[in-house]
Image (cartoon, rainbow, N blue to C red):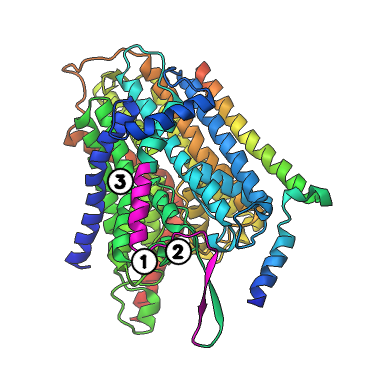
Amino acid sequence: MTWQGWAEIALTLGLAVAIGWPLGVFLSRVWNGERTFLDPVMRPVEGLFYRACGVDPTKNQSWHAYALALLAFNLIGFVFVYAVLRLQGVLPLNPQGFPGLSGHLSFNTAISFVTNTNWQSYAGESTMSTLSQMLVLTVQNFVSAATGATVAAALARAFVANRGEGVGNFWADLIRTTLYLLLPLAFVVAVVLVALGLPQTLAASVTAHTLEGADQKISLYAVASQEAIKMLGINGGGIFNANSAHPFENPTPLTNLITAVSINTLGWAAFFAFGRMVLAKKDVRALVIAAFVLLFAGAAGVYATETQAPPAQVAAKVDASVNMEGKEVRFGAPATAAWVAMTTGASNGSVNGMHSSLMPLGGGIAMFLMQLGEILPGGIGSGVAIMVVMALLSVFVAGLMVGRTPEYLGKKVEAREIQFSILAVVIIPLSMLGFSGIAAVLPEALKGLMHSGPHGLSEILYAYVSGTANNGSAFAGLTANAPWWDVTLGIAMAMGRFLPIVAVLAIAGNLAAKPKLAPTAGTLPTGGGLFVGLLIGVILILGGLQFFPAMALGPIVEHFQALGAVAALR
Amino acid sequence: MQSLYAARSSASRLYAPSWSLVSNNKEALMADLLYGALALGLFALFGAFVAALRRV
């Protein structure tokens, strides 16, 4: 470990927060329907969408109408993506000549992109046509991110309302987030990435003539445009199998910095937007601090583990100061460590190094950050929404300890909010551990593993943790394009996405109907260091403890095996 | 190069798309029905969850 490495990690993580703040101010204006500098261009387009879809953007929807609209939109998205992938072989813009995908792979991919997971049981450059990449996958990258953002907007309005009835309009929130935030920002980042060397073409491939006299086909795509929204929309699904380790998706350390910062920046922006909307900047700052502390701890942990001696290098008597297996030489351990933490803290799932090649505790930290619920800072909106759920549970715990009715941001937190919060939180381990437990004993599932023993269990656990948390990264040893994995991961992704969203919207509906209270002498302060500590404790207990037995059998045992192997060799 | 084309053509036999109803590809149709029903069932479950929470 070097001071330059620590500085690189701190710079990358810090830049994401710093850039997130002004974007958050802008996002709050978008959610509030206030004037922005993009109005002259985007207002007419926005109006066009409303007229075409027959939407009245001023109609205030109840929480259940909002939730049903969200579900209906995503169901339509699923049907469209599934159909295009199945019919890929006969649709235009397929210069690669790829056939349609199988039913189970289409199901998995459609659910994956609709839920913002971008889990890919396939290698993009040998499976997806240009049309599929651009029309369905890239479009879903935009609208799935915007879907998550709508949840935060609804929750923010709930805290602002004083005996209100609605939580906003889903269609207006979706369209405005897409048009005013995601599209313009993705355009700017895509142009920058093109300038830095990412391909952007409709051509299928370019032929290289090798020194041996053979011809090698190198796949090409509209990479920059997909890469921009892949990161900004906290999607993670790359065009190439190697994702952001591929030189066409991430050619230089500068593109690495830009794309790494892009992973987290809109997640932080959603935090700041939420704080500005509910007029509780100090309280939301506490949420940001708690999330950043945990995120930095994760990055530090991965950096520490990746600068340990891997047993194979010790056995070969090679300089073993850094575990470079699975890492790109142009990035090294610090940039990879920062990326691992940012991608697993944020439900992004892109990788600039192979997670299966991380040291056992490094892979364990990646899993742990996802198990916390993707709140560091998580998806655009979905992260802050679940973090607010954690805050509600924290004030509830504090209220139990001091014997006062808990309040948060001016709203009483009562039985129904806690019940819905527990529902939102308990779905995550139910899916992660339930599916992992079944897969660990089913021969059909075990066929897809590359490794046996603790690393094999880690492959299983990582897959369902990643799917349920809508992350999308994977331990690359798993062969997931099989009916069992495709179907069960699809179900896990859908459960992990929509059930917590519905629970959060239900919380929003209840809170909106309550009166807004002024703080009193008995109100627990939720903007200070004490609350930050309490929140971190609740997150670690809720997120960490329930996974500890599974982690003990996977990465923790593997870590001790590695220690034992190194000790035996020295 | 040749092996790449061969791999693709064999893949197209494996992944016969559902449009080939005209060639009576029953397997593709059954797969589409199965996965369509599964997706509808999932979203129906989520809708039922909305209804259940609304009643609480």
Give coordinates of residue A23: x percent, y percent.
Answer: 27, 39
Label 3, residues with CA under 10 Å away: few <14, some 14-19, many ≥20 = many
Asked if residue A244 is among those painted magenta in the image, a careful observer would answer no
Q: What element carries label 1?
A: loop
The C terminus of chain A: image quadrant: bottom left
Out of A32 and A566, give the one closest to the viewer: A32
Q: What residue type is labelled 2?
A: Ser
In this image, A3 relative to A512: left or right? left
Q: Which chain carries label 2?
A: A
C-beta proximity under 8 Å, tags 2 and 3? no
User: Residue A546 lies in what quarter of the image?
Assistant: top left
Q: Are marks 2 and 3 on the same chain?
A: yes
* Location of mark 2 (residue): A356
- Tag 1 subunit: A
Which residue is the site of mark 1? A251
Do badges 1 and 2 share one subunit? Answer: yes
Q: Which chain carries label 3?
A: A
The reply to the same-chain question for discs 3 and 1 is: yes
Residue closest to the eye, A389 or A522: A389
In terms of secondary structure, where does tag 2 sit? helix
Q: Which of marks 2 and 3 is nearer the N terminus?
A: 3
Question: Residue A265 got which mark?
Answer: 3
Kind of residue sitting beneath label 1: Pro
